[in-house]
Image (cartoon, rainbow, N blue to C red):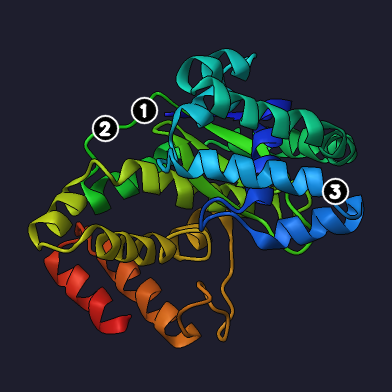
């Protein structure tokens, strides 16, 4: 498995518009506040167009949709959207992008050198060749059935106070919102592995075990999130492979205490040291902790 680092205008423009629209829970209001502070007030027309985009996007709620395919994978996203959307919905989306383009261009031109810098730094870090070693560990832990030949890491805009990642593009891509991050390249790759595991674990023996235990989709997602967080970015494998240190009182997630976070790390570390795969007993321990 290899990593490819990419960024382009269309994926960032889509991220900018969809985040401003707040169409889904994963949109980050912190980015919006930062952009609005730099851009000034939005006109009534711009606000109305963002509401129009939100209305259209919410009727296609799937995250890995033809919207992502169009804006991440195609040089001209409008060909795809014109084919997939009604003429009315296509016009509402196109108008939002047309009117907001000047605002986006201002942000993007200011951030372009940051994105270029991050691409260079991450490509250097990847050459340290830890992928195979990490792959072997997580394959055994989760019983991962297969790995894609290549994972694409898309670089996106961020703000000085917020950065993160997600796996909402497709089955072989993740997003890293890091343009203004002051973290090390090693830490960002540890963050990337967190999102990559969300892609890989879907087809694993561990996920099959969760389904057999009759947990609903949301509950399974929560267990997976806590398990992956115990590994990356500020977990046992983040420390082992990327020298990411977790302080005694530091939280690995905002919604759990530092003590519970340390317990999660310790139980995952125990399974790794003993060469065991995550099993039903591991799930029970996680449930007791959270």
Where is residue 187 drawn, in percent x and y?
A: 62, 55
Q: Which residue is mark 1?
A: 148
Of the numbered discs 2 and 3, the one sitting upstream in the chain is 3
Residue 221's spot in the image, x, y percent? Answer: 31, 59
> Which residue is labeled 2 in the image?
146
Residue density around tag 1, few if under 14, some if 14–19, many if 20 or more, within 10 Å: few
> Alpha carbon of mark 2 to alpha carbon of mark 3: how far?
49 Å
Relative height, residue 77 to residue 57 (above, below): above
Contact? badges 2 and 3 (CB < 8 Å) = no
Residue underneath mark 3:
43
Identified at 43% across, 38% down, the residue is: 60
**Left of 75 or right of it: where is 169?**
left
| Cα distance in 3D space between marks 3 and 1 | 45 Å
Measuring from the top left, give residue 277's x and y in whole percent.
Answer: 20, 57
Q: Is residue 124 left or right of residue 98?
A: left
* Quadrant in which residue 265 is drawn: bottom left
Q: CA distance from mark 2 to mark 1?
A: 7 Å
Q: The residue tagged with tag 2: helix, strand or loop? A: loop
Give the crowd class for mark 3: few <14, some 14-19, many >=20 residues within 10 Å: few
**Can residue 189 be spotted in the picture?**
yes
Say whether marks 2 and 1 touch (CB < 8 Å): yes
Q: Residue at x 64, y 14 (%)?
A: 76
Which one is earlier in the sequence, the residue at label 3 or at label 1?
3
Q: Residues within 10 Å of mark 2 (few under 14, many from 20)?
A: few
Note whether 259 is above or below 182 in the view shown.
below
Front position among marks 2 and 3: 3
Q: Quadrant of the N terminus?
A: top left
Describe the element under mark 1 as helix, strand or loop.
loop
In the visual, does 59 lie left or right of 78? left
For the residue pair 255 and 152, the one nearer the viewer reads as: 255
């Amino acid at each position: 498995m290899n990593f490819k680092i990419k960024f382009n205008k269309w994926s960032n423009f889509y991220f900018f518009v969809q985040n401003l629209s707040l169409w889904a829970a994963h949109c980050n209001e912190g980015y919006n506040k930062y952009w609005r502070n730099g851009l000034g007030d939005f006109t009534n027309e711009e606000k109305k167009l963002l509401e129009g985009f939100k209305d259209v996007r919410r009727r296609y709620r799937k995250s890995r949709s033809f919207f992502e395919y169009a804006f991440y994978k195609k040089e001209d996203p409008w060909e795809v959207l014109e084919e997939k959307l009604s003429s009315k919905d296509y016009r509402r989306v196109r108008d939002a992008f047309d009117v907001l383009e000047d605002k986006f261009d201002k942000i993007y031109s200011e951030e372009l050198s940051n994105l270029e810098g991050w691409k260079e730094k991450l490509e250097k870090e990847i050459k340290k060749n830890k992928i195979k070693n990490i792959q072997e560990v997580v394959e055994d832990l989760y019983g991962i059935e297969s790995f894609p030949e290549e994972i694409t890491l898309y670089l996106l805009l961020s703000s000085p106070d917020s950065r993160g990642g997600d796996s909402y593009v497709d089955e072989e891509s993740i997003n890293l919102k890091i343009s203004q991050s002051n973290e090390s390249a090693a830490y960002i790759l540890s963050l990337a592995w967190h999102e990559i595991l969300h892609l890989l674990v879907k087809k694993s023996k561990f996920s099959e075990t969760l389904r057999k235990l009759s947990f609903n989709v949301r509950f399974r997602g929560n267990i997976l999130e806590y398990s992956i967080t115990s590994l990356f970015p500020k977990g046992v494998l983040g420390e082992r492979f990327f020298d990411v240190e977790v302080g005694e009182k530091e939280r690995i997630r905002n919604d759990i205490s530092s003590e519970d976070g340390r317990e999660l790390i310790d139980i995952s570390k125990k399974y790794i040291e003993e060469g065991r795969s995550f099993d039903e007993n591991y799930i029970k321990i996680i449930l007791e902790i959270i």
